[in-house]
Amino acid sequence: MAAELQQGARRGLSRRDMIKASAAAGAAAWTAPVIIDSLASPAAAASPSCTGTSVTMSWIYILFQVPAGGIFVTGFSTGDKACNSGGKNNGGTRCKANAGTEWTAGPKATGYTITLHNFSSTPPSPAANDITYTASGGCGGTQLNTWTFMNAAAGCGSWIQFNGGQISAINGATILAAMGFGGGALIPACTSSAGPNNSVCGIEGV
């Protein structure tokens, strides 16, 4: 036994060390698949999927600003691949700051808040306060109606586009806030600046 230990010591690795090393290697080989599996789980996903060939919400309105400084509203309806549309809101007044579904937990592009009031006109009218907004990020206080509706004829596609499920600002425009209707409820859409252009999801349920 003494000779065996002496021989192991000369080689630099004892039988006990070899057993420990084998056990450690076995543990590493066993735990690796668990780590991979956890990264692939929904809980580890960075954000919900936002893909599709067209808008699936009943409608969504986008409050946006162009580089020259003017503030505009444009809209999309189910099946749209370009801005110009939108629907009436008879679901009651709702402010974006209320609790609700929000796409992406990433950084927000602006602190603007949008409020949709009851309206049946299409497109909505600022004169009737159909849509109001504030730069304070809250729902209280004075809400502004200093926006203009921009349809396709007026060039909304030069500033707002739909691609791969996302409604994005282009050419230096900024999406300030958005509100849509899907699944029987008004859904505030949080603007994300995580990508090259700030965007909201045009797909219901994400």
Image (cartoon, rainbow, N blue to C red):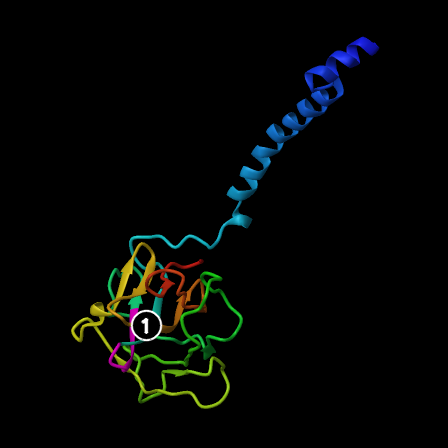
**Front position in the image: 76 or 103:** 103
Q: Position of residue 52 (x, y in %)?
A: 33, 52
**Front position in the image: 40 or 179:** 40
The residue at which mark 1 appears reads as 174
Q: Is residue 73 magenta?
A: yes
Q: Position of residue 14 (x, y in %)?
A: 73, 18
Query: Would you say 188 lies left or right of 61 here?
Result: right
Number of other residues with Cα within 10 Å of mark 1, as a class: few under 14, some 14 to 19, many 20 or more = many
Q: Could you say which quadrant of the image residue 132 lies in?
A: bottom left
Q: Amino acid at mark 1?
A: Thr
Q: Could you say which quadrant of the image residue 112 lies in?
A: bottom left
Q: Position of residue 131 (x, y in %)?
A: 37, 81
Q: Is residue 121 magenta?
A: no
At a point 49% along the width and 89% down the height, the residue shown is 141
Q: Which residues are magenta?
A: 67-75
Q: Secondary structure at mark 1?
A: strand
